[in-house]
Amino acid sequence: MNKKQEIHYHIIFWVLFLLMEVFSDIVFKNAIEKPNEYLLHNLEFLVLQMGIFYLVYLKIAPVTIPVKKWTYLILALILCILLFAGLRYVLEEIVLFKITGFHNYYPNSLRPLFYIFDNSYYAFRIILLSLVFYFVKHQLKVNQQYNELKLQKKQAELQVLKSQLSPHFLFNTLNSFYADALDVNSKLSDDILKLSEMLRYVTYQNEEFVLLKDELNFLNNYIILFKRRFEGSLYIKNSYPEFTKPYKVPTLLLIHFVENAFKHGVLNDVKNPIQLHIEIIKEQLIFKIENTFKPQDNYDEKGIGYKNITQRLQLMFGKNYQLEHFQKENKYFVELQLPLKK
């Protein structure tokens, strides 16, 4: 459901809602006395209900329901009921009374507890409608995201099937190189083995989530081979967490940030090496990387890399992650925090 459709459905809902209110008044009151006062009162009451409706729909539900913060949701809804009663009292018994000279409630009905209790019906009714609207919208969004992920997975699997012949040939060739180099140059044979492992990992790893240890091993092999390419002139300080639990992370996610650092960063400055730090805190993965870069270089990846990464993270974690990337003077910083799966 796009934004235009959403607005269209909301307009239809409020028109029907208003017609039902007017119809019930006509049925139960037989006739509407003092039409001007009735119109003014109902306009105020409609605006009040719309305000509470969209407070829940746009502000409260989106920050509580997707992350299952039910306690916060209940507390917020209780406050909405109190807010509804308070605003109605101010608008009807103070503001409109000065205009019309008419009290909507009898004097003995204006006691705080009774007034709140009596208005809780109207508040709960509009809150419930708001939650229903939000749940429908949320479920449609989840279904759309799920279908997009399924489509992306099918496309990726198809691409793997199309390219299977080439990797088999490449792996066999690398294994031959490894065997030939084993007795001649052990360092070269180790590098060939690392490259073979990386290619195999990229080619055959079709799962959405992989073991963190496998992802870190792939990342480390990539760094080692990159160092070999620069013949010892690439400076990077990296630290990895020690863990025993079988944590899982999205496959081939972290490599994006390391690739960016190698692509745009200054690699041969021994005083300002690339800083890579990964740790686990309360079953959350904390990934940080920073690097210096040349001022004349354009370090703007918003249109390509980070847009895809953000979209992928949103599909997998909703709002339950944090990704920040920014530059300060001649340094670029990336900080990622996401929940670990088991």
Image (tube, helix red, strand yellow):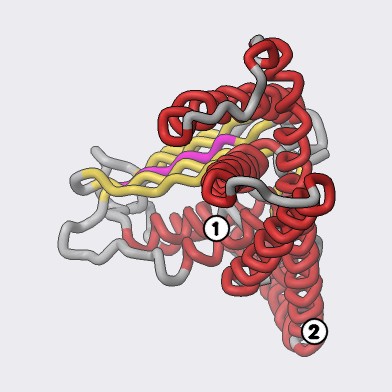
Residue at 58%, 73% (x, y): give it: 4
Residue on which disc 2 sits: 158
Q: Nearer the viewer, residue 155 or 120?
A: 120
Q: What label does residue 164 carry, if any?
A: none
Magenta segment boundaries in residue numbering: 286-291
Mark 1: which amino acid?
Answer: Thr
Seen in the picture, residue 272 relative to 13 is either above or below; the reply is: above
Q: Crowding at label 1, few (<14), some or many (≥20) Cα neighbours within 10 Å?
A: some
Residue at 78%, 89% (x, y): give it: 162
Image location of residue 281, percent across then percent down: 63, 25
Dividing the picture into quadrants, the one containing residue 83 is top right
Residue at 58%, 31% (x, y): give it: 279
Residue 289 sits inside the magenta stretch:
yes
Q: Taking the image as drawn, is residue 35 in sight?
A: yes
Mark 2: which amino acid?
Answer: Leu
Residue on which disc 1 sits: 310
Q: Nearer the viewer, residue 166 or 4?
A: 4
- Which part of the image, by quadrant, shows the N terminus? bottom right
